[in-house]
Image: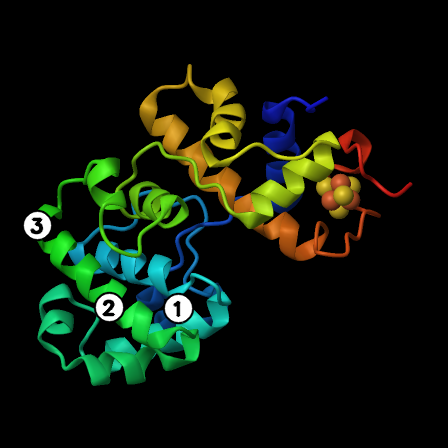
Amino acid sequence: MTPPIGDIFSRLLDAYGPRGWWPLSGLRRLDPRSGGYHPGDFRLPASAKQRFEIGVGAILTQNTTWKQVEGCLDVLESAGLLVSDALLQAPVEVIESAIRPSGYFRVKARKLCGFSRFFQQWDPEPPPRPQLLSVWGIGEETADSILLYAYGRPFFVVDAYTRRLMARLTGEAAPGYAGLRKKITAPFLRLETARRVQVFNEFHALLVHLAKTHCRSRPLCRGCPLETVCMSAER
Ligand code: SF4
């Protein structure tokens, strides 16, 4: 049985506080201790450059750690390539070299170019999800990350951490992407859109934090905020 989703969200928010996603490299450079996070400030991103950076980050973070992505974003920024025009005009070898630490750098360079063209067609309008999904290399998780964090659209992001956590919480195999998203978002559908976006923004970030602190590949259940409601808690 699934513990009430709203209760899970409240427990995580009480335990960890607002996470301030999506981290922005400009904020991180201004205040390295912030890591670029901006807890409680949902006005960001506030510019095309920041929206583009979120899209680039969402692609670069595929199959790698955020630490690696941060380094790549800094190299792109110092080369003046964190702008769609400049990225599209840059030789592909320059892009590949800048993003090499993120892994799969040739494939990701191609994805970044495709996304840059798409970004120029749509921004500042939020793109429709099907169109975004039609861009080569952008799957559901990446598309929803861009829609939620760059454009403030109410699309919850499901990732491997979410699937692992929900399977442990319920003691059952997690459904596919759409099924899990439906299950998690159902209790929040009555909220007005702006509030729903804030909840989805925080909830995904809180689940990632839980997965990195307690619900790791080898779970550390003692002290986990969900210990008393989790079917898999080691007691
Ligand atoms: S109690 Fe353990 S298995 Fe359950 S969510 Fe927490 S860390 Fe994961």
Q: Quadrant of ligand 1?
A: top right
Q: Which residue is mark 2?
A: 110
Residue at 19% over, 66% down:
113
Find the distance from the CA under tag 3 to the CA under tag 2: 17 Å
Find the distance from the CA under tag 1 to the CA under tag 3: 29 Å
Instruction: Tell me if 154 is positioned left or right of 92 in this view.
Output: right
- Viewer-nearest residue: 160 or 37: 160
Q: Is mark 2 within 8 Å of ligand 1?
A: no
Q: Is residue 173 above or below residue 206?
A: above
Confirm whether residue 127 shows in the render: yes
Q: Which residue is mark 3?
A: 121
Q: Name the kind of residue labelled 3 in the image.
A: Gln
Residue at 16% over, 67% down:
83
Q: Residues within 10 Å of mark 3 (few under 14, many from 20)?
A: few
Residue 28, label in figure? 1
Q: Name the kind of residue labelled 1 in the image.
A: Arg
SS under mark 3:
helix
